[in-house]
Amino acid sequence: MKQLTRPPILYLLRQIRPQPLANIPRWMISMKDRESELNEKISFLSSFIALFKDQILTDIQLKPGNDGPSISAHRALLAARSEIFKNMLDSDAYKAPASDTIMLPELNHQELESLLEFLYSGNLPSEKLEKHVYSLTLAADKYDIPYLLKFCERHMLRFLNSSNALDVLEISDTCSNKTLKETALNFIVKNMEDVVFSTKYEAFVPENPHLAVQITRALLMDVKNRRNSGV
């Protein structure tokens, strides 16, 4: 019988794969470099919000509803952030020196201030977003600001619950946001008892009869699908 020989130790060592831990220092350096680069970009772009907060070289006034005080801004930035604002400012009416005010009657002063803060910085503190998310969503839809619309959508999806699901459904319907609407409908169907037996639902139905019908249909479809699947 032929005797088996053990493979040489060098051969065994060559078969050992490099340990992932060996790459950690290089990975950490790479992540640190990326973080540093990101912080530099944030610092560089923060000059825009400084222009707004310090009201430096502003050249246009935005007037909110409810006779609130106007807020100064920059034509160029508004035009860059919104195609609607760009078209408005490019029109003959706003090219004339006397026309230096844009009316935004659907927003109050705080909502307008939050809208402008987002346009200048690309971000918004969580407390302001939570407070004004619905009005900002409507403004983003009306003035064609896709990034703000997506920003608000992510917030509403993340914090969707029984107390705000009807509000989210109503906003999604107004803005024709299919993803948001389907998510809100599915949530309401799965939490039907909590939503339907609330005082908010009693006020919601007369104001949004078509959405009440859609909720009923979605519930019936859910019941049918469960029955067919044997659940």
Image (cartoon, rainbow, N blue to C red):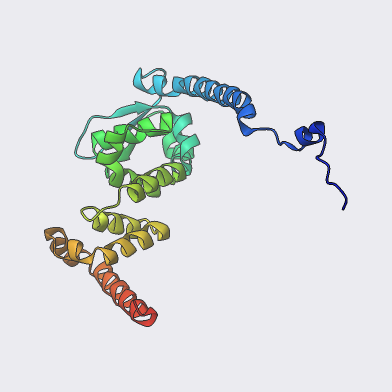
Q: Which quadrant of the figure has residue 109?
A: top left
Name the residue furthest left: 199
Q: Toward the viewer: 161 or 169?
A: 161
> What residue lies at 19% left-to-right and 39% top-to-bottom?
66
> What residue lies at 27% left-to-right and 34% top-to-bottom?
127
Q: Is residue 99 visible?
A: no
> What residue lies at 30% left-to-right and 28% top-to-bottom?
71
Indicate left or right for 73 with 166 as reference. right
Compared to residue 167, the image places residue 38 above or below, namely above
Q: Position of residue 55 (x, y in %)?
A: 36, 19
> Split into 4 quadrants, where in the image is the C terminus?
bottom left
Name the residue furthest right: 2
Q: Is residue 24 visible?
A: yes
Numbered label tally: 0
Q: Position of residue 15 (x, y in %)?
A: 76, 38
Name the residue furthest bottom: 228
Compared to residue 148, the image places residue 215 above or below, namely below
Q: Position of residue 124 (x, y in %)?
A: 35, 33
> What residue lies at 88% left-to-right and 50% top-to-bottom?
2
